[in-house]
Amino acid sequence: MYRRYQQRITRVCLLALLVPVAAQAGAWTTPAGSLWAKASWYRQTTGKWYTDNDQPILLADNTLGTRPAGRRQPYRFNGAYESTAIFLEAKYGITDAIDVGVQVPWFDQSFNDDTRIDPPAEAGFSDVRISARWQLLARPFLLTLKGGTKIPTAEFRNEDGLIPVGEGQWDYDVVVQAGRSFWPIPAYANIDLGYRVRTENESIRRDPGDEWLVTAELGYSPLPSLMLAMKIEGLYGKAGRSFGLRNESLTQRITYLSPSVAYTLFGQTVVEAGLRISAGGRNFPAGRQLTIGLSTTGDPLGAWR
């Protein structure tokens, strides 16, 4: 039983770091010939999580009851999860309506509790994601279709207690993005609705279950160089399968409230800082993530045009 708990912690820790993939919202495609690049840093330390299964409890009348899955509670044995992630991203505009993108994550994560002398930890580059977007509609609002693939480029190590940096299986995303600027009011709104097909990791016969991805975002610019934004980010997974059998403990869900502030340093170079505050979930760490990002946009081929 304890080994099974360790394996669940492993999955939860990795998925908590992969959630930022779901947070990259925006129906605005990259202009033709422009390269947008961003480096983002994420940091989380927490001693609580949203449980994966119903938990038996002793009621006040000394009878057994059940605490439903998804309750926020401390990890067993004074457990603590720490994670640092860096996401390197780039998008290039093929035309004003079509762009392509790549994302390369790097993870450093660990989990410790009172039962361990040598806490499991792992650091390294994770699975690469590639994407393409096509803006289908420009008025009266932007409507963009996005397709993406996660390629299992990172090493997947199936060792007891180890937190792997890769998942060992392919994912395929389809996302519909809708956005609108409210100019002359300096504000915008954006909604993403996506579906992620998650294939089986054949080496361990585990299918993590498909997921719905939802992001709703509002932004307001009180000054020309300052942008304030609020996001609601959600990942809602279906039950997975182990060795072909349905496994509810593989179900992963999380909802974040994500306020952020962005400041234009010069030209099209922007620094951004924010928080991702968990508002509910299942089989995920609870708490807050601190985020810092730096992005810029330019024309890499301008000198040869």
Image (cartoon, helix red, strand yellow):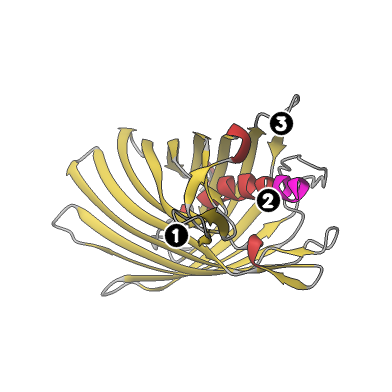
Q: Position of residue 137 (x, y in %)?
A: 37, 75
Mark 2 or 3: the one toward you: 3
Q: Is residue 201 left or right of residue 74?
A: right
Q: Earlier in the sequence, mark 1 or mark 3?
A: 3
Q: Is residue 35 left or right of residue 110?
A: left
Q: In front here: 99 or 229? A: 229
Task: Give the residue displayed 76% in from the left and 40% down from the top.
Answer: 161
- Is 102 within the magenta? no
- Element at badge 1? strand
Q: Within the image, what quadrant is residue 118 found in?
A: top right
Viewer can see residue 24: no
| Disc on res. 115 | 3
| Disc on res. 234 | 1
Kindly report the secondary structure that dominates the magenta region of the rendered protein.
helix
Q: Earlier in the sequence, mark 2 or mark 3?
A: 2
Task: Give the residue displayed 44% in from the left and 41% down from the top.
Answer: 287
Mark 1 or 3: the one toward you: 3
Q: Is residue 290 left or right of residue 105?
A: left
Q: In front here: 195 or 263? A: 195
Magenta span: 1-7
Of the residues shown, which amino acid type is indicated by label 3? Thr
Marks 2/3 in contact by CB < 8 Å: the verdict is no
Instruction: Give the residue at the far right of this rendering.
Output: 203
Q: Which residue is mark 2?
A: 8
Of the residues shown, which amino acid type is indicated by label 2? Arg
Task: Give the residue displayed 56% in from the left and 47% down from the top.
Answer: 16
- Is 3 within the magenta? yes
